[in-house]
Image (cartoon, rainbow, N blue to C red):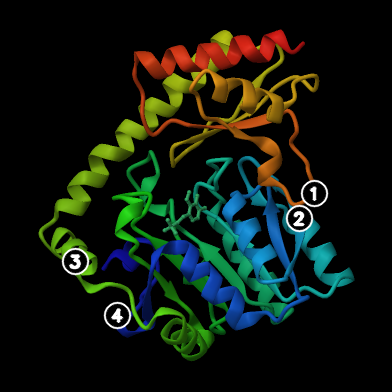
Amino acid sequence: QRALKAGCSLAPDQFVITSGCLEAVTLSLRAVCRPGDTVAIETPIFYNLLQIIEMLDLKALEIPTHPRNGISLSALRYALEHTPIHACLVIPNFNNPFGSRMPEENKQELVMLLERHNIPLIENDVYGDLGFMSERPGIAKRYDRKGLVIHCSSFSKTLAPGYRVGWVVAGRFQESIEKLKAVSNIATATLPQMAIAEFLANGGYDQYLRKIRGVYGLQTSLMAKAVEGCFPKGTRVNTPSGGFVLWVEMPEAVDSIKLYEEALRCGITIAPGTIFSATGKYGNFIRLNAAYWSKRIEQAVSTVGELAKAQI
Ligand SMILES: Cc1ncc(COP(=O)(O)O)c(C=O)c1O
């Protein structure tokens, strides 16, 4: 039923339950790549995904990503024509750190482009339920005709990361992913699955989503406003259409690693931009988390802004 809302008809036996989305992505990469293979990824991209690629001895090929349109299809097309690529990993809905939603026609074109090259697409949809608009965005899996799209997600961003309940819909790779999952840790714990199943069945999840999406929409805009008010002149912040993170570009003189260390000394945690790149880009960017908002957090944003100003 939930897949239908995302434009895709999927049967329960197509789902392999995993311990979170990161396990779903790890199993997917293990199923379609061998050590030394190259994975085309968006840049910037959530740092844990880069760590998984490194852990599996794979190479990351960074493809530029537009804050509104998602991964650049022309850059990907060029890369596919000039480099051996074995998989492509993207977060089409509310990418972390951009918060962008890839337009539906781009998702379809992405699937068709990779299909022409017979390359699996690993779709990470962990933020897909967290759009600020009422309509749930579609998933790339809906355009899959050849079983090449591997759809991964979890309840970590919507409910809580501690449940460790995720899933992968793996198309033609389902059997090998089931085997890899069984060998890795047999199965995902049943109790959290049962608790979540009950929450889904009694309508609690949808009710909660309706509330939390509005809350995140409000909090990201309040935090973005606070950044605009207290960060150095020339700072730019994205306007996400879902999720709860902000990507902040500061003047080039600001060193985000130094800023991270200085903020930490004041008891504030920010994510320095460089960890979102495999090649050390984004030295003057930071990612902020707007999942919570209070006077104390507003003060923390102001402190980070002052620390950034002091670097110029
Ligand atoms: C893009 C993305 N994928 C996966 C995860 C983690 O998912 P899980 O906790 O379900 O493994 C995160 C958490 O921040 C994320 O931002």
The residue carrying pointer 4 sits among few (fewer than 14), some (14 to 19) or many (20 or more) residues within 10 Å by Cα, namely: few
Callout 1: SS? loop
Q: Which mark is residue 62?
A: 2
In the shown orientation, is residue 309 left or right of residue 129? right
Label 4 with label 1: CB-CB less than 8 Å: no
Of the numbered discs 2 and 3, the one sitting upstream in the chain is 2
Label 2 with label 4: CB-CB less than 8 Å: no
Residue at x 53%, y 56% (from the top left corner): 104
Specify the amino acid type for callout 1. Thr
Q: Which mark is residue 121?
A: none
Label 2 with label 1: CB-CB less than 8 Å: yes
Callout 4: SS? helix
Callout 3: SS? helix
Quickly name the residue at label 3. Answer: 197
Of the numbered discs 3 and 4, the one sitting upstream in the chain is 4
Specify the amino acid type for callout 3. Ala
Nearer-the-camera pick, 223 or 160: 160
In space, the residues marked 2 and 3 are separated at their CA atoms by 37 Å
Percent from the top left, x then y, of residue 219? Answer: 38, 26
Callout 2: SS? strand
Of the numbered discs 2 and 4, the one sitting upstream in the chain is 4
Quickly name the residue at label 4. Answer: 12
In space, the residues marked 4 and 1 are separated at their CA atoms by 40 Å
